């Protein structure tokens, strides 16, 4: 089974990475919505790969492309969004893609940072949106953004994605995560871009939109692996429906013989706390029983206070589930 961490400030020291490898980590994810392969080259060459060698591990290096995902622009400082207050998006306010200004009409809701914050559009023009804060929080640069109930019209790959793919072979990338996959065509477009660069790298299609769920079978047939990305997927439906959708995607992956990765808030509380909640370890355990071939931490290792402990709990919980599953299968056979 594969265990991934998201690389960030919290775990980029060589000593920390080596401890995470020794705890059972098999590879890292680079979130290229916040950086680039060119910027990460020194860190990879001087810390990541040496840490893996010191731990005796052949590391997996997964890149998560930008794709058609929408994000807040660069902010000069964190912005405190207070419930009940108004905020501007666009000219003179929080920078957002022009696509958002085109899509968001009065009454539409906009989620920020995997729904940590929620806005409602009150007035809209071609250059600015006046929004009321329904759920507040602290907004940082480059956090995810979604106009709820609206599909994103955007190309499969951005210019930045293509530039990152140009370096993928040279820097030892072993897998490409494709965000917001909307159907077979998105996967085929990425496959063509990889072929043009002579790269035979597996594609992990992220299911995190309504279109992705609706076209799951065609995506399964085109991709090498799937990722059940619960953060943005949870923006597309009431949260109480998300577990059932996760279960159905997992079942279809098992039936199709396609490995899948489970991600988002597996150990979310460990961004602050050294010990997870009971619900979090139960979530990991059940994900393994459902057939997950890989588990991935995001903020827990990228910005969390306890990246080594988080990886330790992830690996130990998953391996316990694997042992129990093997014992149950043995008992059923006898």
Image (cartoon, rainbow, N blue to C red):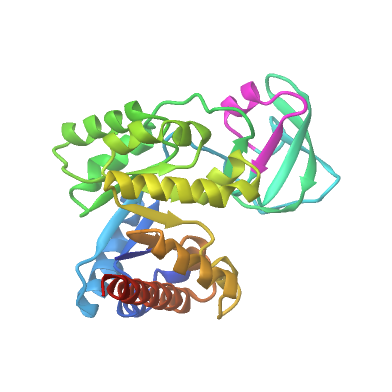
- Location of the C terminus by quadrant is bottom left
Front residue (pair 185, 125): 185
Among all residues in the image, which is located at the extreme right?
84
* Count of number-bearing discs: 0
Name the residue: 28% across, 39% down.
Answer: 223
* Occupied quadrant, residue 180: top left
The image shows residue 176, relative to residue 42, as above or below, that is above
Among all residues in the image, which is located at the extreme left?
198
Name the residue: 54% across, 49% down.
Answer: 244
Front residue (pair 51, 147): 147
Q: Which residues are magenta?
A: 95-111
The image shows residue 254, relative to residue 12, as above or below, that is above
**202 left or right of 159 in image:** left
The image shows residue 124, relative to residue 76, as above or below, that is above
Front residue (pair 272, 204): 204
Among all residues in the image, which is located at the extreme front?
334
* Occupied quadrant, residue 103: top right
- For the question of whether residue 295 can be seen, the reply is yes
Can residue 109 be found in the magenta stretch?
A: yes
Residue 196 in the image: state x and y as whole percent: 17, 31
Residue 152 in the image: state x and y as whole percent: 53, 28
Name the residue: 36% across, 34% down.
Answer: 217
Residue 316 in the image: state x and y as whole percent: 40, 78
- Location of the N terminus by quadrant is bottom left
Can residue 326 be found in the magenta stretch?
A: no
Residue 177 in the image: state x and y as whole percent: 35, 46
* Occupied quadrant, residue 110: top right
**108 left or right of 100 in image:** right
Name the residue: 37% across, 55% down.
Answer: 261
- For the question of whether residue 229 can be seen, the reply is no
The image shows residue 185, relative to residue 299, as above or below, that is above
């Amino acid at each position: 089974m594969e265990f991934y961490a998201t690389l960030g400030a919290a775990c980029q020291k060589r000593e920390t990475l080596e401890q995470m490898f020794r705890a059972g980590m098999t590879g890292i994810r680079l979130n290229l919505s916040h950086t680039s392969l060119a910027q990460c080259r020194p860190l990879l060459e001087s810390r990541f790969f040496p840490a893996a060698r010191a731990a005796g591990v052949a590391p997996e290096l997964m890149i998560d492309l930008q794709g058609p995902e929408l994000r807040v622009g660069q902010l000069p400082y964190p912005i405190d969004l207070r419930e009940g207050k108004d905020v501007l998006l666009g000219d003179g306010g929080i920078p957002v893609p022009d696509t958002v200004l085109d899509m968001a009409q009065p009454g539409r809701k906009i989620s920020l940072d995997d729904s940590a914050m929620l806005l409602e559009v009150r007035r809209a023009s071609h250059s600015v949106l006046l929004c009321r804060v329904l759920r507040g929080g602290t907004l940082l640069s480059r956090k995810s953004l979604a106009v709820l109930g609206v599909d994103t019209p955007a190309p499969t790959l951005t210019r930045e994605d293509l530039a990152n793919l140009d370096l993928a072979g040279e820097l030892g990338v072993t897998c490409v995560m494709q965000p917001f996959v909307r159907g077979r065509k998105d996967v085929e477009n990425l496959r063509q871009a990889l072929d043009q660069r002579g790269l035979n790298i597996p594609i992990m299609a992220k299911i995190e939109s309504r279109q992705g769920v609706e076209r799951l079978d065609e995506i399964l047939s085109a991709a090498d692996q799937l990722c059940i990305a619960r953060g943005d997927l949870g923006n597309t439906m009431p949260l109480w429906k998300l577990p059932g959708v996760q279960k159905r995607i997992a079942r279809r992956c098992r039936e199709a013989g396609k490995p899948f990765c489970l991600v988002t808030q597996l150990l979310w509380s460990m961004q602050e706390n050294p010990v997870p909640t009971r619900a979090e370890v139960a979530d990991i355990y059940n994900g393994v029983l459902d057939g997950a071939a890989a588990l991935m931490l995001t903020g827990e290792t990228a910005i969390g206070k306890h990246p080594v402990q988080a990886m330790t709990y992830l690996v130990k919980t998953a391996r316990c589930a694997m042992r129990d599953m093997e014992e149950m299968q043995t008992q059923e056979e006898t």
